[in-house]
Image (cartoon, rainbow, N blue to C red):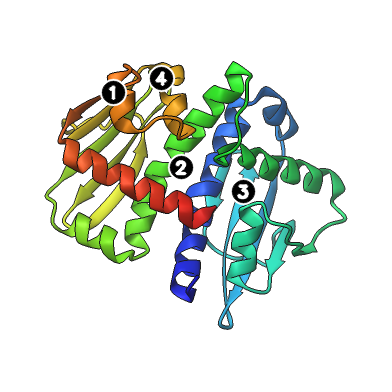
Amino acid sequence: MTVEREVLAARLFLRAVLPVIKVVVTDDPKMKKKFEGVNARVQFVADHEGTPIGSALVFDAEGFRVVHDISNASDITFSFKTIAKMNAFFAGKPVIPKIRGWLKTGLLLNVFGLLMSLKILMPDADPKDPAKRRLKVKMTFFMITTALSQYNKGGDPEMVKWTSKQPERIYQITVDDDIAAYLRVKAGKSMAGRGVYPRRRPFVHMKFNGVEGAYPIVMNQVNMVDAIRKGFLSLEGSPEYGRDIGDFMIRIQELIT
């Protein structure tokens, strides 16, 4: 992989994958309990040609969030010699980072638990528990809409070309009242959000028949054409642009796995 693609992959991990940890902290009762009252900052930093690149998980009274700066005041820091090694770590490869703050054992173990929970996003993760399936669908769609925007902001040439030709358009994904996300595109700019976009009718609206309708597509068990035929999905708007979104999703998945 070229250096440029490694940097883009790192952007996706730090700005699209890490933020969906909030779904785990909020929706998984056991994980939620582990981080109640925790006040801590855990950061991931990689060297890129002499410049540190990274993000941090912040737990405090305001709740969980991801920030994209680097601080010497972090409770725990995972350091990587290269961006490629950090990407491999997030992709579940056997990479051992340098850890500062490892004596904070309780926090470190809980953070490892959080990072392990991201494995549910892997293509081969196929949970049987309905709650876990719901978690996978929710995390996947929240992650992929953010990743699409970051893929554009990170400068992927084909994505940039695709977004630059469009007026303001909303690409909406809806599973149910709790699981909905969108991508907003306008003249080369992009923004992702949760829920239903309130101020404009979707240009493309992918409506899934609940979690069980969405799950086969998340697992790549059916393509969009078969999903529509089987009643898993209804597509409102331009099929061509809906197909483009699907193609970019596949490219992003290939880049980060």
Helix, strand or loop at mark 4: helix
Mark 2 burial class by Cα count in 10 Å: few <14, some 14-19, many 20+: many
| Camera-side mark, 3 or 4 | 4
Which residue is identified by label 1? 228
Q: Amino acid at mark 4?
A: Gly
Residue in the image at 58% along x and 17% along y = 130
State the separation of the CA atoms marked 1 and 2.
Answer: 23 Å
Disc 4 marks which residue?
A: 213
Q: Is residue 29 above or below residue 185?
A: above
Asked if disc 2 and disc 4 are in contact, CB closer than 8 Å, the reply is no
Return the residue at label 3: 58
Between residue 93 and residue 171, name the one nearer to us.
93
Please state the horizontal and vertical placement of residue 91, each as a whole percent of the image.
61, 53
Q: Residue furthest bottom?
A: 50
* Mark-to-mark CA distance, 3 and 4: 34 Å
- Callout 1 amino acid: Ile
Mark 3 or mark 2: which comes first in sequence?
3
Give whichever of discs 3 and 4 has the lower sequence position.
Answer: 3
